[in-house]
Image: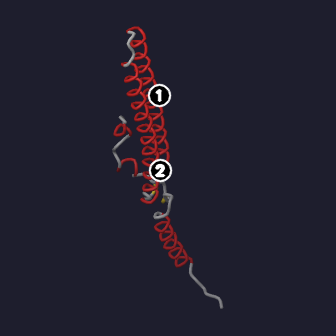
Amino acid sequence: MVISVSPLTALSVTGTVNKLTAAKSATSTNAVRTGNKLILDPVCMQNAVEKRDSAIITASDAYYTTVKASLENRKSALKTAWSITDRKERRSALKTAWTNFTKTKKTATITWRKAKSSAWKQFKLDLRACGSTAASDDYTSEGADAQP
């Protein structure tokens, strides 16, 4: 069986199929290009947010676990230092306790900030793949996560 179709009918059917394909693809995990513009892909944005915030949550958990352990160590070291009767030795032990705490907390903070920054950098890359309006719709930036 042969069906004969005029060129205008074929063009109309092809255009409709392309529009349907574009609409269907927009709900996948990638934005679809229509002309020069990318259509926003909400699923892509949800995945990008999930990825970013999960990374920040993991980094925050590690930060607070480290700081808590450091506080426990400091507490123990300070209590021990205060039990020393010789003033020179006590002062040295107190200084060591505070120095160790400060170094550990500083290192944890640097690690947390790097992880947060890395998560936001990746999010910005993922954002571009999600469509042209994604960046302008979400005006919040990494400054919202500035402090642990």
Query: Residue at (52%, 79%) from the top-left corner?
Result: 9
Query: Residue at (48%, 60%) from the top-left corner?
Result: 34
Category of crowding for the residue at label 1, using alpha-carbon neighbours closer than 10 angstroms: few (below 14), some (14–19), many (at least 20): some
As displayed, is residue 87 above or below residue 2? Answer: above
Kindly identify the amino acid type of the residue bearing the numbered disc 2. Lys
As displayed, is residue 78 above or below residue 92? Answer: below
Q: Secondary structure at mark 1?
A: helix
Q: Secondary structure at mark 2?
A: helix
Query: Residue at (58%, 83%) from the top-left corner?
Result: 5
Which quarter of the figure has residue 59? top left
Q: CA distance from mark 1 to mark 2?
A: 24 Å
- Residue 88 is left or right of residue 3, and the answer is left
The residue singled out by tag 1 in the image is 107
Residue 86 numbered tag: none
Return the x and y of residue 71 as percentages of the image width and height: 39, 31
**In which quadrant will I find the C terminus?**
top left
Return the x and y of residue 10 as percentages of the image width and height: 55, 77
Indicate which disc, 1 or 2, sits on the residue closer to the N terminus.
2
Kindly identify the amino acid type of the residue bearing the numbered disc 1. Thr
Return the x and y of residue 76 as percentages of the image width and height: 40, 27
Work out which residue is located at the far bottom of the displayed protein and give it: 1
Q: Is 7 or 65 nearer to us in this picture?
A: 65
Q: Is 85 or 20 nearer to us in this picture?
A: 85
Instruction: Please report contact status of discs 1 and 2: CB closer than 8 Å, yes or no.
Output: no
Q: Is 113 or 5 nearer to us in this picture?
A: 113
Work out which residue is located at the far right of the displayed protein and give it: 1
The residue singled out by tag 2 in the image is 51
Return the x and y of residue 120 as percentages of the image width and height: 45, 41
Q: Is 93 or 63 nearer to us in this picture?
A: 93
